[in-house]
Image (cartoon, rainbow, N blue to C red):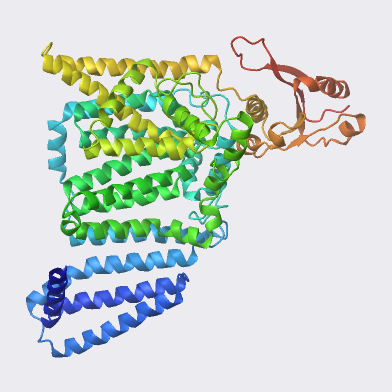
């Protein structure tokens, strides 16, 4: 240790003794950097003493540079060339910090304060762009030429065709009858749509602030883009999750190809394509599906950076590792796991930090820039950053105290049961509850067998860092996404585990095929084809179950939302020339109707608690009226028909549920404009 410190001191002292204009330019850059950092700290009130200290160091270093410059000989042409090579990267880096400082200084503005708030988000985005430019210029990065790209595509044309097939099939399975499946449209989807619509209407302009469910408003920007094109429709709010689910399949292919081989990659992507709950959440207008998307993207780019050692790859890895902080709250786990991958390499690979310290500096810097707004808001409002977690997990919501008493079981038994429900749901226990609610496990029979083989193989090969990553990935979601929430399994929080489940299926099938290859029972090409066929059966089994059996059996039944969707779509056909009157009883999901607010924002609606001549006489006649009544309010609707005898009756049945008798969902009575009693 003493020798290392002595060597470091001698190198530093030797560097200071040899004064050149390029080194003075670097020192001056450090001065500006310290000054900007000091101003950032002071303007964001992160610490007065720290900000002043940075300024003091900057001033002292600046005075030292001025003194050394007076003794330095005139600059040579070589000096000027080296300085010019540093100017653009440093200017870009300095611009990045200044833009980030502006963003942080204004980030706590209200989300709807005005259009100038767009500058806050724009400054943050541009700070990332300028930092990337600085790194790429400093490393002399060059974009691959179109000729080399074309040559690469021609050499891998069959792989390109296979990947296009996967993407096309994944998109079709997720977009087919999107406005009808799953049925019905849920209140949570409507809340997301309302928030996205407010972004479109510029009611929300500070997109770095938190919105509904304490997620960042940036989380709703993809839905806002879709709604801006397709309008406030069910299709509009559900299209963004379709794209996230589709690209998850694509990026899983890239991850598995980087970690294993092309066969494993194709099998894993094909498996994920047909996993029923992944299809389900890819078709729902909520942002849970983004967790799996960020998982495969972060792990792919981080793994590629570790494997290649290129500075540009570390730049992209750090960039995407920070972005999940602005997505669904559960995606924060992905940022932690991505950073953990780098930390594991530092600890496990001897000399890794010494060899890759420049790349690590780039990775850490871009990660800090990306994460800074989220972490700074958490610093300003710590009560909001983890509020959902604190309110839902069993250790803070008193469930772990009440459940052992109610079930007459010990706390360890209750916790073990939670863990068992969260693991066996992948291949044997039903996935009851939550936003999925299926009588079958996540993986159906063929995929379930492959998953068990792949998971078992992985357990016995934990010394392989790839298998260790898969195990950490799976158990992080099993424990932190489900086991600590009641009742387990919490499917909507485990979506990030479906890609790794597909990877285990692929690994299991590949190992079975390798065993058959060792027996030489058939040629490798034939056995690979059999593997693809087996996984295709698993994919078709899952796809058929979700799109046909799952929908026909109506296990995803939400009567309150079914009523709200039905009356909203009926009123939508009539347009704003009609007023909607509802004869209902509470609680009908507490009497809040976000689906109305999203689908028919321009149609007035009103709840009528009682019907009498005075009430009906007081109704305005400037528009037509359509009355909707629950079945037990039919008598009151009859009074309406007697008061307005020229209206039109309609009976709407609920979607049939196998094994249950036919039921009326609601009655409607349409009164044309200008109708008098």
Q: Is residue 332 left or right of residue 674?
A: left
x, y percent for residue 275: 39, 24
Q: As displayed, is residue 661 above or below residue 200?
A: above
Q: As displayed, is residue 279 above or below residue 57?
A: above
Name the image quarter holding residue 137: bottom left
Residue located at (26% from left, 48% from top): 344
Q: Is residue 51 left or right of residue 114?
A: left
Q: As displayed, is residue 463 above or below residue 51?
A: above
Name the image quarter holding residue 541: top left
* Viewer-closest of 483 and 643: 483
Q: Is residue 664 left or right of residue 442?
A: right
Q: Quadrant of the N terminus?
A: bottom left
x, y percent for residue 321: 34, 49
x, y percent for residue 677: 89, 26
Q: Is residue 269 visible?
A: no
Q: Is residue 98 visible?
A: yes
Residue located at (67% from left, 11% from top): 662
x, y percent for residue 509: 25, 21
Q: Is residue 88 left or right of residue 210?
A: left
Residue located at (38% from left, 36% from top): 475
Residue located at (49% from left, 58% from top): 378
* Residue farthest toward the right in the current orientation of the protein: 614
């Amino acid at each position: 240790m003493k020798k290392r410190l002595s060597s470091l001191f001698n190198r530093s002292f030797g560097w200071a003794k040899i004064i050149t204009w390029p080194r003075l330019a670097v020192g001056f850059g450090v001065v500006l950097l310290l000054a900007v950092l000091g101003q950032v700290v002071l303007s964001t009130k992160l610490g007065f003493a720290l900000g002043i200290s940075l300024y003091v160091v900057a001033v002292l270093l600046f005075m030292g540079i001025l003194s050394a410059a007076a003794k330095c000989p005139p600059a040579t042409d070589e000096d000027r060339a080296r300085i010019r090579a540093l100017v653009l990267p440093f200017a870009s880096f300095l611009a990045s910090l200044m833009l980030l400082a502006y963003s942080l200084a204004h980030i706590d503005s209200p989300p709807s304060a005005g259009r100038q708030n767009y500058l806050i988000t724009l400054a943050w985005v541009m700070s990332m762009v300028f930092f990337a430019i600085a790194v790429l210029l400093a490393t002399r990065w060059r974009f691959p030429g179109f000729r080399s790209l074309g040559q690469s595509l021609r050499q891998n044309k069959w792989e390109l065709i296979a990947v296009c097939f996967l993407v096309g099939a994944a998109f079709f399975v997720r977009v087919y009858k999107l406005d009808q499946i799953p049925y019905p449209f849920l209140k949570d989807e409507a809340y997301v749509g309302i928030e996205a619509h407010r972004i479109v209407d510029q009611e929300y302009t500070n997109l770095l602030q938190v919105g509904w469910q304490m997620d960042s408003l940036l989380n709703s920007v993809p839905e806002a883009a879709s709604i801006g094109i397709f309008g406030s429709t069910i299709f509009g709010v559900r299209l963004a999750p379709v794209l996230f689910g589709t690209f998850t399949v694509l990026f899983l292919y890239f991850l598995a190809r980087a970690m294993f081989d092309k066969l494993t990659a194709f099998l894993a992507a094909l498996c994920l394509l047909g996993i029923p709950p992944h299809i389900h959440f890819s078709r729902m207008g909520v942002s849970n599906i983004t967790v799996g998307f960020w998982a495969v993207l972060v792990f792919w780019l981080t793994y590629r950076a570790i494997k290649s050692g290129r500075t540009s790859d570390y730049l992209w890895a750090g960039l995407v590792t920070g972005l999940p902080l602005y997505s669904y709250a559960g995606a924060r786990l992905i940022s932690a796991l991505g950073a953990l991958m780098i930390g594991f390499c530092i600890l496990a690979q001897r000399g890794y930090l010494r060899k890759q310290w420049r790349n690590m500096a780039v990775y850490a810097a871009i990660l800090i820039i990306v994460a800074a707004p989220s972490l700074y808001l958490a610093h300003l409002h710590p009560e909001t950053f983890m509020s959902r977690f604190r309110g839902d997990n069993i250790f803070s919501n008193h469930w772990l105290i009440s459940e052992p008493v109610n079930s007459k079981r010990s706390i360890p038994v209750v916790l073990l049961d939670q863990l068992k429900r969260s693991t066996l749901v992948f291949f044997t226990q039903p996935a009851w509850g939550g936003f999925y609610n299926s009588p079958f496990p996540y993986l159906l029979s063929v995929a379930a067998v492959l998953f068990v083989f792949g998971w078992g193989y992985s357990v016995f090969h934990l010394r392989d860092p790839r298998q260790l990553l898969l195990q950490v990935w799976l158990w992080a979601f099993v424990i932190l996404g489900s086991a600590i929430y009641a009742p387990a399994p919490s499917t909507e929080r485990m979506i990030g585990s479906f890609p790794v489940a597909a990877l285990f299926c692929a690994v299991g099938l590949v190992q079975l095929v390798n065993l058959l290859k060792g027996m030489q029972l058939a040629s490798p090409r034939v056995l690979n084809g059999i593997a693809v066929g087996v996984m295709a059966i698993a994919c078709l089994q899952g796809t058929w179950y979700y799109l046909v059996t799952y929908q026909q059996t109506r296990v995803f039944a939400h009567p309150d939302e079914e009523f709200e969707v039905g009356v909203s779509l009926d009123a939508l056909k009539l347009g704003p020339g009609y007023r909607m009157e509802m004869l209902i009883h509470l609680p009908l999901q507490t009497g809040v109707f976000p689906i109305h607010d999203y689908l028919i924002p321009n149609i007035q609606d009103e709840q009528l608690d009682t019907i009498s001549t005075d009430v009906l006489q007081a109704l305005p006649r400037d528009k037509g009226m359509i009355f909707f009544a629950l079945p037990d309010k039919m008598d009151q609707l009859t009074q309406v028909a007697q008061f307005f005898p020229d209206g039109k009756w309609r009976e709407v049945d609920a979607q049939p549920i196998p094994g249950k008798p036919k039921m009326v969902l609601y009655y409607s009575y349409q009164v044309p404009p200008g109708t008098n009693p």
